[in-house]
Every structure is written in C-alpha cells, then in structure tokens.
Image (cartoon, rainbow, N blue to C red):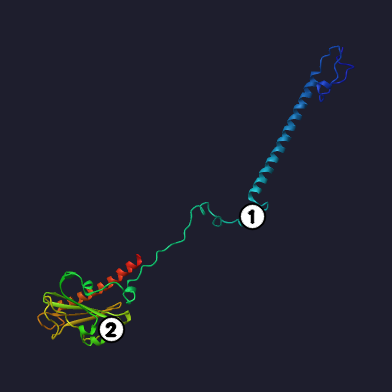
Amino acid sequence: MSYGQGEPQWDPWKPSSQQHQWGSQGATPDWAALAEASEARNRRRRLLLILGGALATVAVGTAVAMAVVSANGDTGASGKPTRELPGTAGIPSQSADADPSFAPTSAPPPLDPMDFISSAAKDTAPISANTLFPGTQLTMGTNVYKKGPTASTAKCASAVRGTLPAVLTKNGCTRLMRASYTKDGVAVTVGVALFDTAAQATKAKQQADGRSILTSLTGQGVPTFCRTTVCRSTTNSYGRYAYFTLAGFTGGKDVTAKDAKVFAAGDDLAEFAFRQIRRRGEAQASAAANR
C-alpha cells in the first residue's frame, strides 16, 4: 500500500497555509521533498544576502567619492596630473598667519652736536670766560695747570696783536674770551673767538699767520710773559669758534724748538679749548633731543 496516492503534490515554494491538506487517512509527509525545499530556500537566502552586500559596497564607494570631490570644491579639480599640482613652496604653511607681523621701526638719528655750534642762531646756551674755563686748575693727562686770570671782551681786536686784529675784525668776531694757566715756569694764554657762522671762523683760521698772536693775560700770580720774547703760538677752529694759544717762559726766556714742555703746555690748552667747545654742542644736542 502506498501513501498519498490520489492527493495533490507538496509545493515547497508555497506557504503551509496554502498547501492542500493531506487526506484524512493520516498519510506521512514526504521528508525528502521537505528537505530539498528547505535547502532551496537557504540557497536563495544566501544569494539574496550576497547580492545585497555587493550593492551596499557600491553605494558606500560612490558616497565616499562624492564626498572627496565635494571637499575639493571643484568636480574637475582632480583632472590634472600630479606634476601639475603646486609644489610645497607654493602652499601656505599652517603658521603663515598664526603670528602677527610688524613693520620694521627705527629710532630717529641722533642730533648732530656740530649743528648747534656752527651758527649763532642755534648756539644759544649761555657762555662766559668762567663757564668756558671753569675751576681753579686744569688736569690734562699727568699735567696739572694752575688757573690764573680770565677776561672777556666784545672788542676782539683789543686783546690780540700782530696781524690777528685785522683778521678777527674782517671776519666779524663778536667776542674774545681768554684765560691763563701756569706750570713749572711755563705760562699759557688760551683765547676763544666767537663768530656768527662756522664759515667765518674757518676763514679766520685760514687767514691767520705766524704773526697773528694773542696778547698774554697776566695777573693773579701770573707774571708778564711773551711780550718781548719769542713764544710759541697755535691757531685752529671748530664750528663757529676760532681758538688760539700763546705759550712761553715766565722768566723772559725765548722759546726754542727744543723746549718740549712749552709745546706740551700749548697743545694741552688747545686740546682743552676744543673739548669745551665740543661739549657745548653735545649738551645742546642732548637737551634738544629730550624736549
């Protein structure tokens, strides 16, 4: 006796609710057919999963590509070969704008002291024989000189001799200040003449000659010297100032080329006059800069 004859066949692809019911005879199901149907369903499920995964992978790749293109800001930006892309030097570094930059600054140049002592218009600081030749003695290196009398006059020609009166008058001397110093039997008179301009002082120096000399200043312990004897004289200028020295022996002896201490004394006083004039310019330049 066979089971299931005359009954409809089992369709493995239909749900169980749609299958025809077995007969009331209580026939046993075909287990082989059911196994094949189950295996077929599993194969179909695996195939659908594989196809779905592949489609998902393609979708993700497309999304990433779109994001990269969008980040470039230009859908055609990646069309150039690598060698045409800008080099590293053309790409701003991260710190290019990180630190602020400042334009270089420079301090104004210092004022020139010579500008203040080259004309009467700017050389306005007070001046006198006592401010130009201060103190009671002068130290130059190892030499110490005792200060004697000082004098100042607006009549420049009255305090000089030889050819110097004409030179000072011709070039417009406005004042002549003098002071005398002594050391070991040697006396020196130093004189500073003022002019309105540096050009006038320079001309006075150039026009002076070997007979253009100061009148020695005596008194206050300084005996008469260099009135009738041979003495050594110097002439120079700086700014609107011309300065002179006359050096000799207090005992009436003539000066010769071998008398080194007379030459040294004259040079010391000439150097001192130059320094005092220069200090006037420096002081006035400094004061102007601080205003």
Q: Marks 2 and 1: which is nearer the front?
A: 2
Q: Is residue 35 visible?
A: yes
Secondary structure beneath disc 2?
helix
Q: Which residue is mark 2?
A: 204
Residue 213 seen in the figure: no
Q: Identity of the amino acid at label 1?
A: Pro
Identify the image quadrant of residue 162: bottom left
The quarter of the displayed image where residue 278 is located: bottom left
- In three-dimensional space, the C-alpha distance between marks 2 and 1, rounded to whole angstroms, equals 83 Å
Above or below, comparing residue 60 to residue 6 in the picture: below
Residue 51, labelled with which disc? Answer: none
Residue 279 position, x and y percent, is: 27, 70
Residue under label 1: 81
Say above or below: 142 vs 240. above
In which quadrant of the rendered image does the C terminus lie? Answer: bottom left
Question: In x, y percent, where is residue 18?
Answer: 84, 22
